Every structure is written in structure tokens, then in C-alpha cells.
Amino acid sequence: MGMFVLSNILPSIFTLIRPFLKWFLHRFTRLCELQRICYGCSRGAPRNKQLEVSLNLSKTPSIKNMIREFDEFVEYCDDKEFDLLPARGIAAIMYAKKIKPKIHPDFPKLLGKSIQQIWGYRRLLHVVERLREEQYDTENGRHEQKLLELWNLLMPDIPLSARVTKQWQDIGFQGDDPKTDFRGMGILGLDNLLYFVKEYNTAARHVLLHSMHPVYGYTFAIVGINLTSMAYKLLKSGRARTHFYNVTTGPCTLEDFHKFYCYLFFEFDKFWMECEPRNIMEFPIIHQTFEESIIGSLNNDSTTFKTNFVVEEI
Ligand SMILES: *[C@@H]1O[C@H](CO)[C@@H](O)[C@H](O)[C@H]1NC(C)=O
Ligand SMILES: *[C@@H]1O[C@H](CO)[C@@H](O)[C@H](O)[C@H]1NC(C)=O
Ligand SMILES: *[C@@H]1O[C@H](CO)[C@@H](O)[C@H](O)[C@H]1NC(C)=O
Ligand SMILES: CC(=O)N[C@H]1CO[C@H](CO)[C@@H](O)[C@@H]1O
């Protein structure tokens, strides 16, 4: 009970003393909070996450405006427009905080990198969301082509007998036409699968082989689409920031999201085989345990998921 009350009032105490603390530290170190974070936290997730908290709490009107503008801007901006953000952000913050570039030459560089990463992630959210909302359409030649490519890359020696056929079940779709299986995840599900199969063909076919195991088998494509939903949720909740802020020094891209997905799929398959489930009924619990372990890793700011998959020969 005591702990409960304390954990409830602590945040408000923090809010109350924050301005005082900031003033005190400013007097003491002659640096504003954003500078202290840039100099004091290691690059990647630790620094960017702290900067996000600090920027979110900022009471300076011009900084609040800048954040709102940037958030709107990244919904549709192209790469060239995106490249303008760091300079705009640096100028706005240096001016608002009265920081002299001559005295603090490193600060703009560090801040610019972080702005790229923070708004790169927010931009990626929009890119991913649009793909998820794009429904699979049999009239769309691009969609159809991707689906056939998926088959050919997974089953290079077995031609598809027709567009609609029970053969789709061999790679883990539900019925004789995959189009309905993409539902909740749209083209994002297909693009994720295709990326895995194309860029990590050996690893993907190794996973497909596991999914055909007589005892521990599972539906490859359906589970793959389910893992798209896991990757999407982790991105949207902001938990995946840890990985995306650490995996590249620039802004993260759709390709980084595909790679994150490949990591989840490869690792899920490994975990599933290690669990030796008696049947597919154990999917929800294994899924949950796996997701919790991924979240546990993402709670550690040092985490970066590596996609140098090692496939044992069989
Ligand atoms: C900052 O605010 C944005 C928009 O309100 C929100 O999406 C984000 O999760 C917040 N980040 C942090 C670290 O509080
Ligand atoms: C993925 O599988 C889990 C476990 O069965 C389930 O809770 C979740 O709703 C599924 N996600 C989608 C998008 O079907
Ligand atoms: C976070 O991960 C790093 C590197 O993997 C490890 O050294 C460290 O002990 C971890 N921290 C916690 C709190 O688990
Ligand atoms: C690219 C990058 O910024 N990687 C960082 C990931 O997180 C670790 C630990 O916090 C940093 O040391 C890396 O520099």
C-alpha cells in the first residue's frame, strides 16, 4: 500500500521539482538539459530516448512548435525533404536555448544525428502504417507478382500448378488462395515475408523446412504474418526504438524494419523448435513467452538485434 501511494505521487513530485532541478544544473554546469544529455549519454538508444523525454517536456513555445511541425512533416516528406530536418532543428534549439556554436561546436553535430534518428523512427511508423493499410488486391499486378515471387523463391523446384491451388498450403497459407490470409497486416505482411525469403533465402528455407516437421510443424506463412503483427506492435508502441536507434547511426528505414522482422521470424522458429511443442495448440503460450523475451531485451538500452543468421547444415 505504501509503495503504491509512493509510486503514484513520485511522478508529480518529479514534475514539481523538475524546473528547480533544471535551473540548478544549468547554474552549476552552464549547460542546458539537452546539452547535458548529448554529452553525457552514449549515442544511440540511451541518448535519443532521453532527448525525446526532455523535448516532450519542454515548455518553450518555439520548441513545442518545432516538435509539432516535425511530427506532421514526417508523415509524407520524401528523403530530400527529410534531410532538411537536422539543420532546422539545430537552428531552432540553438536559438531558443541561446547556445553559441563557437563555444559548443560538438553540440549541433550530436543533436543533428539524434534529430535524424528520432524523426526517422516517427517517419518509419507512417511508412509501415500505409503498407499495413494497403489491402491485398488480386487486380493489382504488383501484388500478384510479389505473391508468385514468394512461391518461386521458397519452392524453386516445384512450379505452381495454378494461381488458386491447394499448393499454397505447402508454404503455410490457410486455403487455396493466400489473398485472404493477409487481412489485418495487408501488404506489409507480404512484403515482410518476401524480404525474408529474398534477402536471407537459406535461412528462410531452413525455417520453412522446420515448419514442415512431422511433429513440430506449423504454418509458415500464417505464423510469418502473425510475426509481422508482432513487429508492427513493437514499432508502434515505441519499444522497438532501442533496436532502431542502435542498429544504424543514420535514420532508420523500411529496410531496417524488414530486417527486424527477419530477426523475429528466425528467432521465433529457433525458440519454437527448442520448445518441442506437442501441437499447434501451444502456439499462443510460446508466442507470448517469445514476445516477452523480446520486450525484455528491448528494455535494455544496449540491445541491438543482429541478422547474421547461422544455419546448421542438415
Ligand atoms: C513524446 O511525445 C510523442 C507525441 O506526443 C509520443 O509519441 C512519444 O511517445 C513521446 N516520447 C516520449 C519519450 O515520451
Ligand atoms: C498472433 O498470435 C497470437 C497468439 O495466438 C494472437 O494472440 C494474436 O492475436 C495473433 N495476431 C494476429 C494479428 O493474428
Ligand atoms: C544490457 O545488455 C548489456 C549488453 O548485452 C549487458 O552487458 C548488461 O548487463 C545488460 N543490462 C541489464 C540491466 O540487463
Ligand atoms: C549505432 C549506435 O548508436 N549504436 C549504439 C547502441 O547502443 C550501445 C549501448 O548503449 C551504444 O554504445 C552504441 O553506440
Image: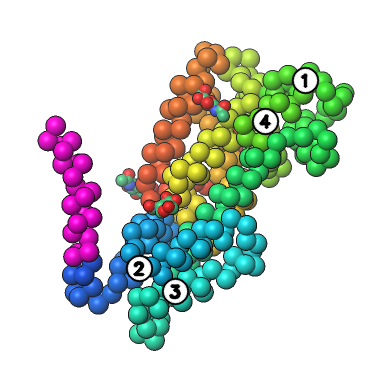
Residue at (58, 50) in percent of width and height = 126
Instruction: Report x, y in % for residue 222.
Output: 64, 26
Residue at (45, 27) in percent of width and height = 288
Going from N to C along the chain, the mark reached first, 1 or 3, is 3
Assign the N terminus to one quadrant of the image: top left
Instruction: Report x, y in % for residue 313.
Output: 63, 33
Residue at (23, 73) in percent of width and height = 26
Q: CA distance from mark 1 to mark 3?
A: 56 Å
Going from N to C along the chain, the mark reached first, 2 or 4, is 2
Badge 1, how many Cα within 10 Å: few under 14, some, many 20+? some
Q: Is residue 65 above or below residue 305?
A: below
For label 4, the residue is 182
For label 1, the residue is 176
Q: CA distance from mark 2 to mark 3?
A: 11 Å
Instruction: Report x, y in % for residue 245.
Output: 47, 55
Residue 60 shows which numbered tag?
Answer: 2
Going from N to C along the chain, the mark reached first, 4 or 1, is 1
Assign the C terminus to one quadrant of the image: top right
Q: Amino acid at mark 3?
A: Ala
For label 3, the residue is 92
Q: CA distance from mark 4 to mark 1?
A: 13 Å
- Depth check: give the residue in front, 62 or 281: 62
Going from N to C along the chain, the mark reached first, 4 or 3, is 3
| CB atoms of marks 2 and 4 within 8 Å | no
Q: Amino acid at mark 4?
A: Phe
For mark 4, give the secondary structure.
Answer: helix
Does any atom of ligand 2 lie closer than 8 Å to the CB of label 4?
A: no
Query: Relative to residue 117, is residue 34 drawn left or right?
Result: left
